[in-house]
Image: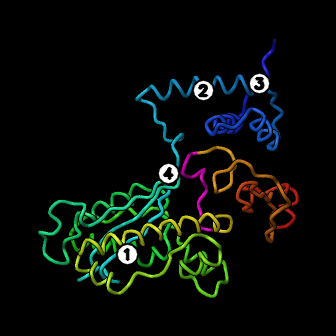
Amino acid sequence: MGRGPTWEAWEEEITWRYHQEGRTIAETIQALKSRGSDRGENSVRHKREGLRQVHSHISSSPDVSLIKLRKPRILYFDIETTDFKGGPFGELLMMGYRWEDEDDYKIIHIYDYKGWNKERLNLRDKQIVKAASEIISSADVLVGHYSPRFDLPFIQTRLAVHRLPPVAEPKHIDTWRICAKQLAFSSNRLGKVAEYLGVPQQKGEVSLATWRASKAHELWALEELSEYCIQDVKTTYEVMQVLKPIAREWPSMNLLTGGMVYECPCGSYRVAKNGFYLTKVNKYDRYKCKDCGRWTRGRQSVVDKATERMMK
């Protein structure tokens, strides 16, 4: 029996990705067919098994880089502080966060670190600031609400106060900015945006007494503030899931994973051609994601060379 046509790199990538995601062979064939491939069931089955063996060998070889197989590190976060400014009197009390591909929410507190209360007042947050910086620096993408204007500058300020290296700032997505620049809500505060979009939000504000007690590092107040902080991270995450299809700042997953085939910025391969995107002198294929609904355009112009020359 003769061998079929050589597999293209993008065909192999879709086949392997669908295998990793637990998709069926029928779903894989459908995804390939939507890109113009006519692979049959036996061909896809054999290719999946071959790729499984190859990746099994790679994963057991310590000298081979697996960077193209890793998932992007997308971090949602929120901080609570003693002041609106990081210097000279503000301190970082806690940072709540979650990773895009994990379900659990985590939080670090100023009192998690041994000896914090032995430092001079307003300098007690050195260890938590360093820990927060390390977490943020490990991310590929950072997501917060108003965080490029408050949260991250506050952390950078505290790092400078403590004479620590600055945080390595990743790509930063601001849900406040998306609402302010791309939507027309009457208020862009996180609670209001959550209300408009129908996602979970805070049940009231933190009392003034709790804020004052937190500033004095009273444990009961910090624990109450922790619940508020975690809920803000949850709300930011849920809001971002709604905003993803329109968020112009959301990066391509190909840039983060080393992918070789066109995919939606949400990471889905389930995109379908739907019309064209026109500029003054060019035309591009237009795509719509079947998972998140986002509209995107292809990278290559579909205008033939002869027509292109006539328009110049």
The earlier-in-sequence mark between 3 and 4 is 3
Q: Relative to 123, is 211 above or below?
A: below
Q: Give neighbour class at mark 3: few <14, some 14-19, many 20+ (Cα, 10 Å).
A: some
Q: Residues within 10 Å of mark 1 (few under 14, many from 20)?
A: some
The magenta stretch is 248-258
C-alpha gap between disc 3 and disc 1: 53 Å
CA gap, disc 3 to disc 2? Answer: 14 Å
Residue bearing mark 3: 43
Give the answer, above or below, for where 160 lies relative to 10: below
Residue at position x 55%, y 28% in the image: 55
Label 2 packing within 10 angstroms: few (<14), some (14-19), many (20+): some
> Which residue lies under the disc numbered 1?
153
Task: Classify mark 1: helix, strand or loop.
Answer: helix
Q: What residue sits right under mark 4 in the picture?
A: 102
Residue closer to the observer: 198 or 91: 198
287 and 29: which one is in front?
29
Frontmost residue, 290 versus 117: 117
Q: Secondary structure at mark 4?
A: loop
Residue depicted at x 36% and y 66%:
95
Q: Is residue 255 magenta?
A: yes
User: Residue drawn 59% across and 86% down?
Assistant: 187
Q: Position of residue 75 (x, y in %)?
A: 47, 59
Judge whether 226 appears above or below 303 on screen. below
